[in-house]
Amino acid sequence: MICKNYISISLLEDTIYMIKTDWMYEYNEKLCTAEVAAQAVQNDDFILAPICLGQPTALITDAIADRKDELKNVEWRAHLLIRPHKIVNPEYRDTFKITSAFVGTPFIKSVFKEEGYGSYAPASVLTSYKQWTGRRKPDVTMVMVTPPDNEGFVNVGPDCMFPKTLIQGRSTERGTVGGARVVIGEVNDQYIPVCGQTRYHISNFTHFVEHSSELPAFPSPVPKDIHHKMAESVVSLLRDRDSIQIGIGAVPMLISDLIVQSDLKDLGIFTEMLPTGAPLWQEKGILTGKYKKFRPGKMTATFIGPAKELYDFVRNNEDVEFLPSDITNNPSIIGAEEQIVGINGALEIDLAGQVACLTIGNRMVSGYGGQSDFAMGCRLSNFGRMIIVMASSAKDAEGNLISRIVPDLTPGSLVGTMAIHLDYVVTENGIAGPLDGMTIDERAEALIKVAHPKLQDDLVVDAKKKGLFR
C-alpha cells in the first residue's frame, strides 16, 4: 500500500507539472518578431485594436506598414491613438484605409483634419460590442498584454473595453460569434496587471511579440478660471450615495479636488474611464461604494486614460474591477443603480437641449464614446442625473466670440445625447435645469441664462425667429 500511494502521488505531481508547463511550449511556439506577426495580415483585412493603453506600440503597426507594396485594401480602425504610428501617414493611404469610431488625440485627429467625417464609423462603446462581433468582425487584432503568469494567462491591463470582443467574440444562444482570425499579443513587462475580467489564456492568441516599452502619460491639463466655476456648480449637484461616471480633463480634475473638500460621503464609482481623483477619494474615506447595486464596495470601470497618477493605484488593486464594455456601458445595468450621475462634455447645445459632443458640422472632434450609453442609463436610474459641462463660448478663426449654446446645431453636426436624456447643463455662468419636463420655451430660457452674457440678447432674438417665447 505504501508503494502504491507513493506512485500515485508521484504521477499526480508529474501531471500537475505537465499542465503547468505545457503552456510554455505553446507560448514559445507562438513567440515571434513583429515582422513575422505582420505577415499574418492579408489583402482586404480589417484590423482593430483596443482604445487606449491596450493599443500596441508602433513596433507591430510599423511592420505592417512596411508591407504597403505587398498588401491591398487593408483597413485599420484606429481609436484614440496615444502614440504616433507611421501607418496613418499620407504615403501609406493607397494601401491602408484609416477609419475611426473615436478620434480625440492629435495622432488620429490629423487623419480627419482635411477629410471631414467620411471615415468616421458611428458607434457608441456599447454598440461597438455588437458591431465588432457581427457585421464588422475584425480579421486581425493587436493587444498589449503582460507577460504570462504561472498558469499561462496574460493580463490585458486597464484597457478592458474591447479585448473580450476582439479576442474571444461574443457568446449567444447560437454559439460564439466574432473573434479575430489573427490575435497578436504584444508582451510588455512594463504593462500593468489589473483585477476584473482581464486574464486571457495564451491559447486565445495566434502570435506573441515581446517588447519592453514604457507606457505613455499625458500631462495634466492646466485649469482656467471658468473651469473652477463649472466644477463648483457640478459638485453642488452631487449627493451622498451617488455613483459617479466621469472622465479626465481640467474640469473633472477640479471636481475631484472639490469632492475631497466637500461633506459628501459614501460615493461610488460606476464609470467608463476611471477618474484621476479615485485614489484620493478612497484615501479620504469619501469613496465607499457600499450603496452601489452592482459590485458594492468596488470601483467599476472599463479603462483608464494615459494618466500616470493612476498606474500604481490600479496595479493588482482588488478594489478596482475592470470589466468589458457590455457590462460597464449597458444602460440596463447602469440604470439599476439608485443614484447614477453622468458628468460629460459637449461642443454645442441647441435651445431644445440636443447635445453635439463629437462633431462641429462635419468636422470630427471625438466620437460618441460612452456618453449616449450613460445618458440612457441615467434616465433609467430612479434618481439618476445626466449633467453636461461646457464653456459657454469659444472664438472662431478670426477671434470673434461665438456661443456654444446655439439656436440650432451647426449643419451636419451629429447629436450625441438626445434632449430627452438631459437633466442639467453647467457653464461658467451657472446651472440650467433640471430640464426634464420643461417645454422647449422653458428649456431655451434656462439655457440662454447660462450662455455668455454678451451673446444672450442675440440668442433671444434667434429664439423668437424660431417661434419661441410667443
Image: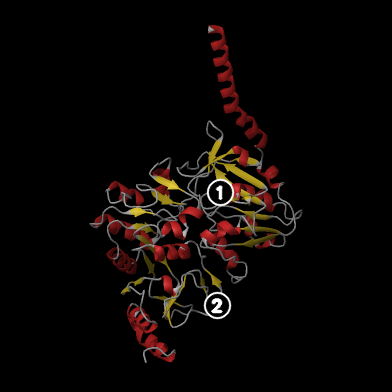
Tell whether 83 sits left or right of 228: right
* Residue behind mark 1: 164
Outermost left residue? 263
Q: Against 380, is 9 above or below? A: above
Going by the numbered disc 2, the residue's amino acid type is Gly
Residue located at (36% from left, 76% from top): 437
Residue 436: assigned label: none
Disc 1, SS = helix
Going by the numbered disc 1, the residue's amino acid type is Lys
Q: Against 458, is 338 above or below? A: above
Disc 2, SS = loop
Tell whether 19 sits left or right of 73: left
Residue located at (63% from left, 45% from top): 184
Q: Position of residue 109 (x, y in %)?
A: 55, 64
Mark 2 surroundings: few (<14), some (14-19) or many (≥20) residues within 10 A: few
Q: How far is disc 2 from disc 1 in space, using C-alphas?
A: 34 Å
* Residue behind mark 2: 412
Q: Mark yes or no: residue 394 visible.
A: yes
Q: Nearer the viewer, residue 254 or 329?
A: 329
Q: Position of residue 215 (x, y in %)?
A: 49, 47
Tell whether 244 sits left or right of 163: left
Residue located at (59% from left, 43% from top): 186
Q: Earlier in the sequence, mark 2 or mark 1?
A: 1
Mark 1 surroundings: few (<14), some (14-19) or many (≥20) residues within 10 A: many
Q: Mark yes or no: residue 247 visible.
A: no
Q: Against 119, is 275 above or below? A: above
Quarter holding the C terminus is: bottom left
Q: Position of residue 74 (x, y in %)?
A: 70, 57
Outermost right residue? 70
C-beta proximity under 8 Å, tags 2 and 1:
no
Q: Position of residue 56 (x, y in %)?
A: 58, 48
